[in-house]
Image: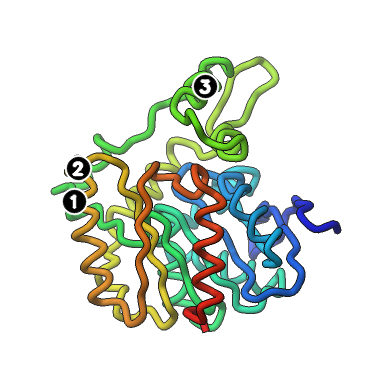
Amino acid sequence: MRMGEVISEHVRVGEVALHVNRWEGHGRQPSFLLVHGLASNARLWDGVATRLSDRGHAAVAVDLRGHGLSDKPDDGYDFGTVSADLATLIAALRLDRPVAAGQSWGGNVVMELAVRHPRTVRGIVCVDGGTIHLSRSFASWDRCAAALAPPKTAGLPRERIEAMVRAGHAGWPQSGVDGALANWEFRADGTVAPWLTFEHHMTILRHLYEHKPSEVYPKVPVPVLLVPADTGDDEWTAGKRGSVAEAEAALPRVRTHWFVGHHDVHAQYPDDVADLFIETADSGFFG
């Protein structure tokens, strides 16, 4: 395997097969496990992983169950099962206590991974996630579901989706645009369907609504790098700043680095995000 080359494969994790993309490094520690957000996919991490590999760090990006090219069982979308999938994947790939980086919902997932399986990781990174506490923003699940249910895009023409993605991601590197497009299956008849079904999306959203990260923070046994994004929405970002401050006060060991950009800041600015990961590791923060 040549440096910078990506290997795509499926790894059996209990009753499901998870799709992963792997990049070799040249021996620099730590390695990185890259975890996407809700309704996203591993390819949003392509740019970050390529940069990490070029700098000598091995990287693995995973499609979580129900997402991308991974299996799509009817159940197992709770935090306990999804974090156990990751712990089993780390063991199956013989990763030596990687740093687990999760974006959005994936940030909450890697927080749970560190608490439930503390020997599997040496640190975690939460990219505009990990502090998501939906029950504080919505008084009931019904209100949350009404506000955050995804648009039903199954059956739309491919050209419409491509135009929508390119218009919404102007100025992004090609790796980020390709990653965003990879949230959909492109069918032979010219239409699309999201890899994550609407039903599975809503199941995960319900678990996220019920998740209380404030109860998790004091239990996290490894260093945490918070990477929130100021998306330009003043009210939303102000609430996010309050959540980040709460996490900073409760996490045993934490650093924070803000970006100004999209919620998917890792896809928008992959080199900058990867360099932050490396600089933090080189400083000894992750041990």
For mark 3, give the secondary structure.
helix
**Label 2 belongs to which residue?**
234
49 above or below 25?
above
Amino acid carrying mark 1 in the image? Ala
Question: Could you tell whether 189 is left or right of 128 in the image?
Answer: right
Determine the CA span between mark 1 and mark 3: 31 Å
Q: Are marks 1 and 2 in contact (CB under 8 Å)?
A: yes
Query: Residue farthest to the left?
Result: 139
Q: Is residue 219 left or right of residue 241?
A: right
**Residue 274 sits in quarter:** bottom right
At a point 49% along the width and 50% down the height, the residue shown is: 266
Image depth: mark 3 or mark 2 in front: 2
Badge 3 crowding class, 10 Å Cα cut-off, few under 14, some 14 to 19, many 20 or more, is: some
Of callouts 3 and 2, the N-terminal one: 3
Check disc 2: other Cα within 10 Å, few if <14, some if 14-19, many if 20+: few
Residue occupied by mark 3:
161
Residue 234 in sight: yes
Q: Position of residue 56 (x, y in %)?
A: 71, 66
Q: Residue placed at 38% from the left, 52% from the top?
A: 259
Q: Which is more foreground, mark 1 or mark 3?
A: 1
Say the numbered circle drawn on residue 238: 1
Badge 1 or badge 3: first in the primary sequence? 3
